[in-house]
Amino acid sequence: MFTGLVEEMGQVLSIKNGEKSVQLKIKCEKVLKNAKIGDSIATNGTCLTAIEIGKDYFVADCMHETVKRTNLARLKTGNLVNLEKSISLSTPLGGHLVTGDVDCEGVIKSITQDGIAKIYEIEIEHRFMKYVVEKGRISLDGASLSIVGFKENSLQVSLIPHTQQMITLGRKKVGDHINVETDLIGKYIERMMTFKEDEKTSEKSRLDKNFLASHGFF
């Protein structure tokens, strides 16, 4: 589990392509503190397992599911990536709960200057728009950001100058791909509301729209 607060930007040192897989070697510093083999490190918002750790780098394998769903397969040597080490129970939750399981790739449709900030419009698959709410949270390349607005197939986030400097999104341009993970809570609520139990072996669920409304979810 992660918070979506990017600790540093690492640099891709090498890429090894395998059979429906990719192995990445990434130069970094902060996420290696007290790190050990087997630890999880979010790389552009994708939870990867460190299989080798050096003084200033780690190596991770990306399986086929990761390659086909995320932008890690698009990386080139020298590219920058957002990095965050997995949290512990004592870690302050400054962003939101991020699993590191990317839903889909988004594409940057526009970048607009708005005073000191820049507004990025990201187009995503329509089926994931149901988890997008204004002022809700979303993880873009592993960075926890607030949604400032949305349209039928796109959402907007606003970045102040400091954030632009600290995460990869601030260096991207129109047409670039970005990893998207929508909010976890909405997925669980949807699953519980749509799951059909066998009435012969279980009692009817009390979880419905009226129950959620009475408990402040609507």
Image (tube, rainbow, N blue to C red):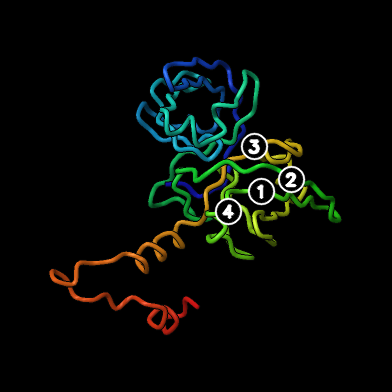
Which numbered dot is residue 126? 4
Q: Is residue 161 left or right of residue 102?
A: right
Q: Are marks 2 and 3 in contact (CB under 8 Å)?
A: no
Near mark 2 (Cα within 10 A), the count class, few <14, some 14-19 or many ≥20, is some
Query: Helix or strand or loop: what does disc 4 sit on?
Result: helix
Q: Are marks 1 and 2 in contact (CB under 8 Å)?
A: yes
Alpha-carbon span between mark 2 and mark 3 = 10 Å
Alpha-carbon span between mark 4 and mark 3 = 16 Å
Q: Position of residue 200 (x, y in %)?
A: 14, 71
Q: Which residue is mark 3?
A: 177
Q: Residue at x 44, y 27 (%)?
A: 62
Tag 4: residue type?
Answer: His
Q: Is residue 175 left or right of residue 146?
A: right
Q: Which residue is mark 2?
A: 109
Q: Residue at x 29, y 78 (%)?
A: 206
Alpha-carbon span between mark 3 and mark 1 = 10 Å
Q: Which residue is mark 1?
A: 123
Query: Helix or strand or loop: what does disc 3 sit on?
Result: strand
**Closer to viewer: mark 2 or mark 4:** 4
Near mark 3 (Cα within 10 A), the count class, few <14, some 14-19 or many ≥20, is many
Tag 3: residue type?
Answer: His
Tag 1: residue type?
Answer: Glu
Q: Position of residue 82 (x, y in %)?
A: 59, 36
Tag 2: residue type?
Answer: Lys
Alpha-carbon span between mark 4 and mark 1 = 9 Å
